[in-house]
Image: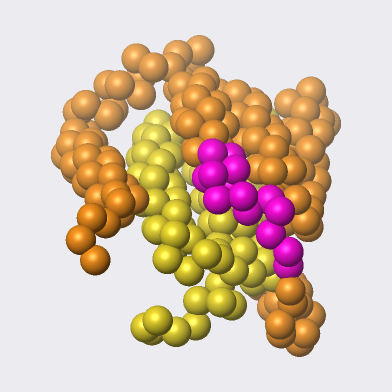
Amino acid sequence: MNVETVLFIFVGAVALVAAIAMVVTRNMVHSALFMVVVFLATAVLYLIYQAPLIAMLQITVYAGGIMVLFLFVIMLIGAEKMSHVENLRWQRPLAFGLAAALLIVTVYLASLELRTPAPVEVGPDFGSPEAIGQVLFSQYVLPFEVISILLLVAMVGAVVLTRKEKTR
Amino acid sequence: MIPLAYPILLSALLFTTGVVGVLIRRNAIMMFMCVELMLNAANILFVAFARAFGQLDGQVFVFFSITVAAAEVAVGLALIVTIFRTRHSIEVDDLCELQR
């Protein structure tokens, strides 16, 4: 077992524990902070897999932008103080049963066809901004443009949705 | 070189955690965060396979996935804020009527 694998197991365990803590914590602000831990651990995993650009994007967009947006909305509507009333008692065990079934089926199906390919040697510039940019602006230039339109539509949509209604 | 089974197992576990969260939490923001967790689990697998096959396409796909997640969060949180303004609650159990 080499250093990479040990590091992967350690960081993966951190991500998993933080994810479980995020789901079970009552306080939503704490949940959001656990989510930041998950995103940071994932960024480290990306670094282990030689994806430095994606790791930096993960930190700036996910841990920086998206989670700040979540925290902002949680505090804006005061959701961290909302009381929780469980209406459907039978729902929780059923949820755990279904999730366990999903996990078993997923791992089983993945293990059926799993053949680890021969280790591929990649250069030191694998996953660098230059390499990603080369692929992004040659092979994937159309999806890139479509994504820009999607972001514009999302921005306009968010502004329109949260606008105060004047005439009612 | 990390065996491919490890990221698959980690991704499956994180995805299942997200599914459990969506199923047991009744708060719209919490359900939304769990959806983000599921997206994250899928992204880990993309990057792991990109490295295993020495192809950059997986990383480019994660780039797109992160962008779409950002757009999704912007619109989703706007919807949640709007729902909270009209119903004064974001518990999904309270949102069971088609009209007020």
Does A53 lie within the magenta span? no
Could you say which is closer to the camera, residue B61 or residue B65? B65
Residue at (48%, 69%) from the top-left corner? Answer: B87
Q: Does residue A20 lie above or below A156 as drawn?
A: below
| Residue B20 figure quarter | bottom right
The answer to whether residue A75 is magenta is yes
Residue A103 relative to residue B64: left or right: right
Residue A159 image position (x, y, % from top left)? 28, 45
Q: Residue at x 43, y 34 (%)?
A: B59
Name the colour assigned to chain A in the rendering: orange
> Where does the magenta region start and end?
A71-84
Which residue is farthest front?
A: A167
The tally of labels here is 0
Question: Residue A24 is drawn in which quadrant?
Answer: bottom right
Q: Position of residue B5 (x, y in %)?
A: 69, 49
Q: Nearer the viewer, residue A124 or A101?
A: A101
Q: Is residue B49 left or right of residue A6?
A: left
Measuring 67% from the left and 66% from the top, which residue is drawn there? B25
Secondary structure mostly seen in magenta is helix
The picture places residue B24, in percent across and down from the top left corner, at 70, 70
Please say which color scheme the image uses: by chain
- Would residue A71 be visible to someone looking at this image? yes
Q: Is residue B96 above or below residue B74?
A: below
Q: Is residue A23 above or below residue A70?
A: below
State the residue at coordinates (30%, 51%): A164
Q: Which quarter of the figure has residue A11?
A: top right
> Would residue B9 be visible to someone looking at this image?
no
> Looking at the figure, which quarter contains the N terminus of chain A?
top right
* Chain in yellow (letter): B
Query: As rendered, which of B18 and B82 lies closer to the eye?
Result: B82
Q: Is residue B32 left or right of residue A20?
A: left
Residue A43 in percent (x, y) is at: 60, 29
